[in-house]
Image: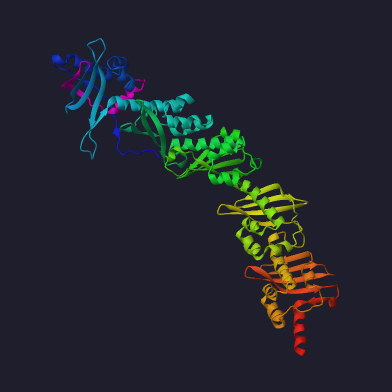
Amino acid sequence: MMLRLMTFLTVGTALVIGGTLSGCSNLLTARSIQTFADSLAEKDLETLKERTSSEFDQKALRTADALDDIKILNLPTGKISVAKVEEISETEKHVTVEVGERKKEVLYKLTRKAGSRKWLVDDIYLQQKKPGMDEPITKSVSETMDLLLTVREFLDSWQTGGRDDVLAVTTPEFRDLLDDLAPTHLLQLTTQVVGDSSSKSSFRPEARMEDDRAVVLLPRKGGTLVIELTLHDSDWMVNDVAVESHDEKDRVRSTKRMARILKSTEEFLTGYDAENREQMQPWCTEAFYRNSLAVGDFSSAPLPVGRLLSSAYDVRVHDDQADLMFHIDDMTYMLTLVEPSSDGLSTGMKPYEVSEVTIYEADGKQVKRMSAVFTTQAIVQIFSQALATGDLARLKQTSTSDFNLQVWDHLDDELLASLPLDEIEVAEPQIVATQFQGPLTEVTVTQGTRALTYILRESRGRITVDDVLMPVVHRPASIKQNLRALIPVYAMARAIYAHDFTSVRRTSSRTLDRLVWQPLGEVPDLGVDIIQHLTAPVSALSMTEDRAELILGDDNWGTRLTLTQVDDQFVVDDALFISGPDASQQVDLKSAGRLNLAQQMDQ
């Protein structure tokens, strides 16, 4: 942000110097000052130039507006008399004059015209005492006028000049930033900054100079223009400009900062258009580059770079972040940039870094973030490969916490390998379409001979798989819901096969455990192959919030299971083992268990 100075050299009304200078020894001196004063009062610029040194002419009288601006300096007016003459050298003298009834002292610096006895005004010094200051401040008229005329030239150049004119009035550092901007963006920026700044008839700047720096405040429509200037090789040059306004859309905190934002944006877009990752890397945050751009397929998120570089922009600048938006047809492209933190270098010298690109389609109904597009592709590939190879650790890494809680946390590698996932073919997914809905992303793919939809969700900057939708009938499409029902069934089958009675009880409801397992102390002989029945193909699944009905096999051979939810997982509550269509060929687990218990008690 620009340096804000709280006190200013305030400038006001016209100067008229009159009076008669007396004293023969000071005659030539008096004539020089008198002629200067008369010419100034008469607005005779030509004579003024003849009566001033070339340096004063260049600094204070170089433009047609000089006579209007010199009035702003509030030079004292009235009768003039020479109070003191100090001979500095044969070619220079300092003359103190008293002006007006209050005998206001003004110091003239005169230099002898080469090859002549004429004395020329080389500078004028005024003293002003500000409130709260013990000593008055001495101001050079030529330096102050040089500053004001530079501001005039700056306004003219930025309002009506070409690119070279715009750059000519700026410091090298500022110029380098502006020179790299696309013509459309440079024009919009300069127009926004100077806008309807004070016209020639209302040019009322307030300024303060401090060594080689100066700040000038200039009223403009709806606010104030704040111009920061620095001396370069004795010339004032604009180093930054701000617009203070009550209207947020007109406010510019720092033109230099805005130029940095635009430069980073344009460099990023140019690299993106060329698909040149090396060119883009310096203009991106490390995370955005590493996680998205370095691995992404640019064709999946095309940007109309040519139109972006030639289109008007909207901008929202925050403390350390900026959002730059381009509206093209029915699309809005927003680049989010962050200001890098300082690491010993001046933050103002470091480029802004693109941290995200967001595409708003169809009046904002679909929001597509580039990081989500590129990350989505990678996550789908990694997840599908992990599922195909039974890589449980990788599945957990690429899944949401809910997916882990409900499914993967209840599996081990062996149990995962036993689950029936026939609808998920071992093939690389080919992305067909991607739908973005805020933090939710739906990716439709063809995987082998089937169409699947991967559901991904963003949380805390990470995108992970929350579910996979399968093309099935008579049961939920969600692989998450299918596995929630199948895991306890297959876990029970494995436990029975391994004679792990503790695990059998763990996969059962409290009711089943109380009625069957606890009293019997073992898995009873039901006259059917329980393991084969529990691992028959899935035919149907219906679920409510806390119950599920799972059908394996068919009416001639299979199992009908009832599951109930305990905490975050399902457990087996009952099972009907079917070996044929007749009731005599069907065994209910709870009933059979009670029967076995009764038989044991009779023996």
Compared to 395, does 46 lie above or below?
above
Q: Is residue 220 left or right of residue 209?
A: right
Instruction: Give the residue at the far top of this rendering.
Output: 115
Compared to 30, does 462 lie above or below?
below
Compared to 23, does 423 lie above or below?
below
Name the quarter where the N terminus is drawn: top left
Residue drawn 58% across and 36% down?
271
Q: Is residue 184 left or right of residue 572?
A: left
Q: Which image quadrant is residue 537 in?
A: bottom right
Compared to 507, does 318 lie above or below?
above
Instruction: Give the residue at the far front of this rendering.
Output: 498
Name the quarter where the C terminus is drawn: bottom right
Residue drawn 64% across and 60% down?
403
Pick the front one: 466 or 407: 407
Q: Can see residue 283?
A: yes
- Give the colouring mode of the picture: rainbow
Q: Which image quadrant is residue 225 in?
A: top left
> Residue 180 at what x, y percent from top left?
51, 31
Q: How many marks?
A: 0
Magenta-drawn stretch contains 73: yes
Q: Is residue 457 left or right of residue 88?
A: right
The magenta segment is 62-91
Magenta-drawn stretch contains 363: no
Q: Which image quadrant is residue 307 in?
A: top right
Q: Is residue 209 left or right of residue 451?
A: left
Q: Can see residue 222?
A: no
> Residue 202 at what x, y percent from top left?
36, 29
Pick the front one: 573 or 72: 573
Pick the front one: 4 or 161: 4
> Residue 359 at what x, y percent from top left?
60, 43
> Residue 485 at what x, y percent from top left?
71, 66
